[in-house]
Amino acid sequence: EEIKTRGIAGFIEYVNKYKNADSLMTVLRHEARVVVDIDYHGQNSPENCSHVITLDLEHTPEWTAWNKQHSFTQLGFAEFIEDNLPDFLSPDGATMLEIATKLKIDQKVEFQSGMTLQNGDTKFVYSVDTVTRDMTVPAIISVAIPVFRDGSLVRCEFRMRFRLSEGKVTFTMKPNRLDKVHDDALDKVLVDVVSQCDLLTMIA
């Protein structure tokens, strides 16, 4: 019997329920996979090795949404903020919602300039019906999201860039070392699984 699962908690629970002294765990790090042969061979008791459970670590929708470079129009950036509002750490969700609201309300605008402030943020000056307004967009955005299903939250950072052209603004959000964030999260999950299952383990 071969069972496959993407849930970390369910995998650990199953293994601990059915494991025995001869069960073998194999960790395939580059495939983000853990395989346990429940009925592996004992020293003097050959088995069929037919009772197997496999954990294939699954990326979360949050990780999929954030793990790439994004380029946004004014409205697109506002909608992305609203769609992912619970994830924001710094600036917090309330601040980002204020930015999104301004971007959505003031769509028919003429952006006049973008000035980098001392802290690295960008202050935009724009006009709406001859009224001059301003808005500050952070240089760095931090979010807290789980990389893997059932995994803990991790901090991810993104650098904000912009381009002004003919009174319009385009925002670009570039991930900052998310490859390392991913690998650290993977290692943490694997260490936790190995520790909680407490089996003879092979690393492949």
Image: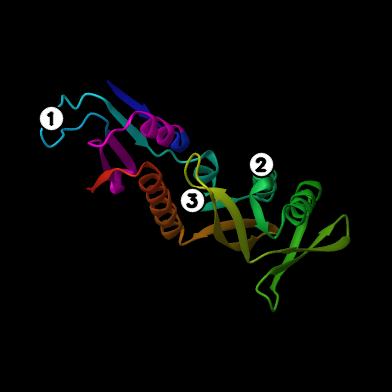
Are the two marked residues, 3 and 1, in contact with CB atoms closer than 8 angstroms? no
Q: Which residues are magenta?
A: 10-36
Residue 115 rendering spot, x and y as whole percentages:
70, 72
Numbered tag placed on residue 83 in the rendering? 2
Residue 27 located left or right of residue 11: left
Q: Secondary structure at mark 2?
A: helix
Q: Is residue 131 above or below residue 145?
A: below
Amino acid carrying label 3: it is Lys
Q: From mark 3 to mark 1, how far is it between C-alphas?
A: 50 Å
Numbered tag placed on residue 68 in the rendering? 3
Foreground disc of the pair 2, 1: 1
> Can you tell which quarter of the image residue 120 is in?
bottom right
N-terminal of the pair, mark 3 or mark 2, is 3
Numbered tag placed on residue 45 in the rendering? 1
Residue 182 rendering spot, x and y as whole percentages:
43, 53
Q: Secondary structure at mark 1?
A: loop
Q: From mark 2 to mark 1, how far is it between C-alphas?
A: 56 Å
N-terminal of the pair, mark 2 or mark 1, is 1
Numbered tag placed on residue 128 in the rendering? none
**Residue farthest top in this picture:** 1
At horizontal 40% and vertical 39% (from top left) the residue drawn is 57
At horizontal 12% and vertical 30% (from top left) the residue drawn is 45
Would residue 151 be counted in the magenta stretch? no
In this rendered view, identify the residue nearer to me: 97 or 10: 10
Residue 90 rendering spot, x and y as whole percentages:
67, 60
Are the two marked residues, 2 and 1, in contact with CB atoms closer than 8 angstroms? no
At horizontal 33% and vertical 25% (from top left) the residue drawn is 3
Residue 17 located left or right of residue 82: left
10 Å neighbourhood of mark 2: few (<14), some, or many (≥20)?
few
